[in-house]
Amino acid sequence: MLLYYMDYLYSIILALVQAVTEFLPISSSGHLIIFHQFLRSEILNNLTFDVVLHAGTFLAVLIYFFSDIVRLVKGFFFTVFKFKISHDFNQQLPWLLVIGTIPAALIGYFFDSFIEQTFRSVIWVVVMLVFGGLLFIYYERRSQKNRNLDSMSFADSLIIGLAQVLAFIPGTSRSGITIVAAMSQDFKRSEAAKFSFLLSLPVILGATIRKVSQISLADFSEFIFVFILGAAVSALFGYLVIKYFMKFVERHSLTVFAAYRFALAAALIIIFLI
């Protein structure tokens, strides 16, 4: 009975970790390594549960940016049926997101096994945590941060998309590297964060669909209420994280996250490498 209730507790904890680390630029992989070390639960290594949590964070983005997504869908189908992209930003943005998604989609499809075998180590997590933190500090100082999304070009979206490829290396943080890439092109932090979150939709959806074929229906039926709880917590707190992070970056720099990344890297070195 105790183990049964612990599954619910672990479900909540892991859903919170998923919600926070999916959207804050602090690296989900670095935290999951620590949780794998100290948290012993069948849920932790359950692929079906992982899919459920990603579905929850996808729902969080979908709800928070719902009005933007409606405009994106309308703009996309308008350009498809008209066979041209006008100067209307709502018609351009869907294609900017498509271009930003292509590099990661191609690298993920063709090099997934190579990446898995080459970069799945604590050392790489530590390196990328530090590297990402240094990028935060550098571009906070260098970037003019004066551009809005309606000035984004296809070249800008390609640069951000190429940067997103680095997120395949554990410790990078998908949101962190795409926000920094946008800031490198002088976009405001809040605008960079918005594009990063919208760009996460095809990434999260694609990862979820890819894993669906591998999930176990037996696991789902056995842990159905645990999974529902995890999805709900992931969606709710994912929404809250997006909401308050968007407010935070309007007035505050990313250096606080750089400091956190350095501290996490130091913790991983102490725990695993010393």
Image: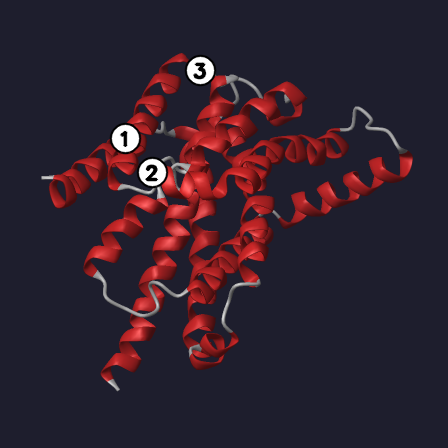
x, y percentage for residue 44? 33, 63
Q: How is the image coloured?
A: secondary structure
Q: Read off the residue under disc 3.
A: 143
Q: Are marks 2 and 1 in contact (CB under 8 Å)?
A: yes
Report the amino acid beneath label 1.
Val
Dot 1 crowding, Cα within 10 Å, few <14, some 14–19, many 20+: some
Residue 57 shows in the view: yes
x, y percentage for residue 4? 30, 81
Left-right relation of 6 to 274: right
Q: Read off the residue under disc 2.
A: 171
Mark before the other along the chain sequence, 2 or 1? 1
At x 38%, y 42%, the residue is 117
Question: Between residues 248 and 215, which one lies in front from this camera angle?
Answer: 215
x, y percentage for residue 99? 65, 30
Q: Read off the residue under disc 1.
A: 127
**Label drawn at residue 117:** none
Dot 2 crowding, Cα within 10 Å, few <14, some 14–19, many 20+: many
At x 89%, y 39%, the residue is 81
Question: Between residues 136 and 112, which one lies in front from this camera angle?
Answer: 112
Disc nearest the viewer among 3 and 2: 2
Q: Are marks 1 and 3 in contact (CB under 8 Å)?
A: no
Q: CA distance from mark 3 to mark 2?
A: 23 Å
Report the amino acid beneath label 3.
Ser
Question: Between residues 265 and 76, which one lies in front from this camera angle?
Answer: 265
- Please state, as top left, top right, bottom left or bottom right, where the N terminus lies in the image: bottom left
